[in-house]
């Protein structure tokens, strides 16, 4: 246009700026800005609004604010563009403050302004402010468009106002996939999984985000079986999962120690479909393999990552700690520090746990002290629990007790449980009884506490204490929790408990177990002479 000397107006500059939106187009957009002044469009409201929007969207807030402050005239679009820039770039409080200034200047907000402000409330998780905005919208006679209702719904969901969200949803005459997905998300985040599933099943049309919301709900609420079953249904329906879905389902595999499904997703889905392993996906794979017992594969994945974030380092450090590889965890921590990685509270949970498993008292004390003195991190209850566990494991029970009684935060079940475990390991029934009482006060229904204490007293031949514990269990109606295990075969989960006969093929299973037990007691050469596939036809008969 410039070369051909075509006459330009305000819209020409707005369209030009639109082409260069984003961080990469800052220089080109700056060139358009220079041209604006050169050609005398500096006072054009349309152009000034375009400049504020361009800089704000790109994250250049100081430049956007400079243009905003120098505007010859500001309309609702100018104010909204600046407010939105702050909100989208983490300056929520400044955006809300600017809205107050806008109202004092008697500029009337429009629908886009209100959607931006509702988004700000969602980011702050400020339910009270969101409700006040809702009231303002109703009193100001705004037209309740679908976009505005969806923004209101999203705000209530992210602020934990499920009752208000349901009220808005039920009053909507028309709902789109965003509306339904918001309700699935909201119910799942509040732990209302059955209600979330009801909304999910009633959705007239679902997209991949809808499926992901329900799968994430199951995964985050410790329902890995349901998450995996829904994932299989999604894939069978021909939908292609997004990265967030894969991260959620790998988390479900990790929770249930379901290595088969995790490996299938990795090898037959991610690799075969040539899906890029981003940092988030790589972290999820590391966590899954480690929690499924394949620390070697987790280590290989970590070493092959081209880019790592703090979560990557934390995942690997904590994985080493969980697998009793204390020295490897500490070596990796030193490597991270040397590379300039700044540890957080999660890092130190892994490090202190690693010291505990390796019995490294001196190193554990040093890292615990370094948290605050070197890295400026105030130890939390979980860090104290790790230290109590470390001291308890090596028999320093009095020191562990001193720590739990003087720590600046209230000890939780993990802290008292660590002390009780130390007492169990080293046969201190008196201190164990004290720790158990604290645990029973915190969670009277946890049968594990009673069982550990009863076993400890039994080992010390304190039969009166054992009788007292059993009486207390009966009095409180506590029964020993029955252990359960599960296995996944071809997308179906099978759960079992001790002496369980509820499975439809229980009789066949017990026959197999009996035969397996018999073989395990035979000499190796005797076992080799048996023609197992012919003799045990129930294995091959489905």
Image (tube, rainbow, N blue to C red):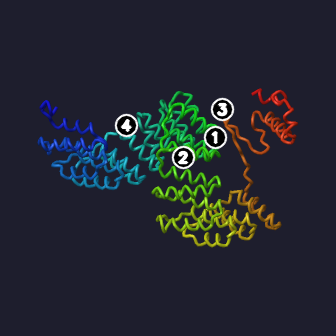
Q: Residue at x 69, y 39 (%)?
A: 487
Name the spot of residue 201 as percent of width and height, x first.
54, 33
User: Nearer the observer, disc 2 or disc 1?
Assistant: 2
Q: Residue 242, which numbered label?
A: none
Q: Secondary structure at mark 2?
A: helix
Sooner in the amino-acid sequence: mark 1 or mark 4: 4
Task: Kindly identify which residue carries mark 2.
Answer: 302
Tags 1 and 4 touching, CB below 8 Å: no
Task: Kindly identify which residue carries mark 4.
Answer: 146
Could you tell me if residue 59 is visible in this image? yes
Q: Is residue 177 left or right of residue 510?
A: left
Q: Residue at x 32, y 53 (%)?
A: 96
* Mark 1 crowdedness (10 Å alpha carbons): few <14, some 14-19, many ≥20: many
Sooner in the amino-acid sequence: mark 3 or mark 2: 2
Tags 2 and 1 touching, CB below 8 Å: no
Tags 3 and 4 touching, CB below 8 Å: no
Name the spot of residue 474 as percent of width and height, x first.
76, 59
Sooner in the amino-acid sequence: mark 3 or mark 4: 4
Q: Is residue 443 left or right of residue 177?
A: right
Task: Kindly identify which residue carries mark 3.
Answer: 490
Mark 1–mark 4 distance (CA, rounded to whole Å): 44 Å
* Mark 4 crowdedness (10 Å alpha carbons): few <14, some 14-19, many ≥20: some
Sooner in the amino-acid sequence: mark 3 or mark 1: 1
> Which of 481 and 61 lies nearest the eye of the viewer?
61
Task: Give the quadrant of the C terminus.
Answer: top right
Tags 3 and 2 touching, CB below 8 Å: no
Task: Kindly identify which residue carries mark 1.
Answer: 259
| Count of all numbered marks drawn on residues in the image | 4
């Amino acid at each position: 246009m410039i070369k051909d000397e075509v006459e330009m107006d305000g819209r020409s500059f707005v369209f030009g700026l639109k082409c260069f939106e984003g961080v990469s187009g800052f220089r080109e957009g700056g060139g358009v800005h220079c041209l604006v002044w050169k050609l005398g469009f500096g006072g054009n409201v349309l152009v000034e609004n375009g400049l504020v929007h361009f800089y704000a969207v790109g994250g250049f807030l100081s430049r956007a604010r400079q243009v905003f402050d120098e505007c010859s005239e500001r309309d609702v679009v100018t104010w909204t563009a600046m407010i939105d820039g702050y909100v989208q770039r983490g300056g929520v409080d400044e955006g809300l403050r600017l809205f107050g200034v806008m109202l004092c200047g008697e500029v009337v907000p429009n629908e886009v302004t209100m959607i931006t402000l509702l988004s700000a409330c969602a980011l702050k998780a400020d339910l009270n402010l969101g409700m006040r905005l809702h009231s303002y919208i109703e009193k100001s006679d705004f037209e309740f468009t679908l976009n505005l209702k969806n923004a209101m719904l999203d705000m209530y969901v992210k602020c934990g106002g499920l009752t208000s969200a349901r009220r808005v949803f039920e009053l909507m005459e028309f709902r789109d996939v965003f509306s339904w997905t918001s309700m699935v998300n909201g119910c799942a985040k509040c732990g209302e999984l059955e209600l979330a599933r009801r909304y999910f099943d009633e959705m007239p049309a679902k997209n991949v985000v809808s499926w992901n919301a329900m799968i994430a709900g199951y995964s985050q609420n410790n329902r890995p079986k349901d998450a995996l079953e829904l994932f299989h249904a999604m894939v069978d329906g021909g939908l292609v999962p997004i990265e967030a879905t894969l991260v959620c389902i790998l988390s479900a595999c990790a929770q249930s120690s379901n290595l088969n499904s995790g490996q299938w997703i990795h090898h037959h889905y991610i690799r075969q479909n040539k899906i890029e392993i981003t940092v988030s996906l790589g972290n999820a794979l590391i966590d899954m393999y480690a929690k499924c017992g394949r620390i070697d594969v987790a280590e290989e994945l970590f070493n092959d990552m081209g880019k790592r974030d703090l979560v990557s380092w934390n995942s690997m450090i904590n994985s080493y700690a969980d697998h009793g590889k204390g020295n490897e965890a500490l070596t990796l921590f030193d490597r991270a520090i040397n590379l300039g990685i700044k540890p957080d509270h999660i890092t130190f949970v892994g490090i202190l746990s690693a010291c505990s498993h390796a019995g490294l008292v001196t190193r554990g004390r040093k890292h615990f002290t370094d948290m605050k003195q070197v890295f400026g991190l105030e130890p939390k209850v979980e860090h104290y629990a790790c230290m109590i566990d470390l001291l308890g494991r090596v028999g320093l029970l009095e020191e562990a007790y001193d720590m739990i009684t003087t720590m600046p935060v209230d000890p939780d079940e993990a802290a008292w449980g660590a002390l009780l475990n130390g007492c169990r390991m080293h046969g201190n029934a008196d201190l164990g009884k004290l720790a158990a009482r604290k645990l029973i006060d915190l969670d009277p229904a946890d049968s594990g506490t009673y069982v550990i204490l009863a076993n400890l007293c039994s080992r010390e031949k304190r039969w009166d204490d054992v009788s007292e514990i059993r009486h207390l269990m009966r009095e409180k109606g506590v029964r020993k929790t029955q252990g359960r295990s599960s296995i996944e075969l071809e997308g179906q989960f099978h759960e079992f408990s001790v002496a369980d006969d509820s499975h439809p093929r229980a009789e066949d299973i017990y026959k197999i177990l009996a035969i397996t037990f018999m073989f395990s007691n035979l000499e190796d050469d005797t076992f080799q002479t048996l023609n197992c596939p012919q003799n045990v036809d129930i294995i091959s008969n489905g």
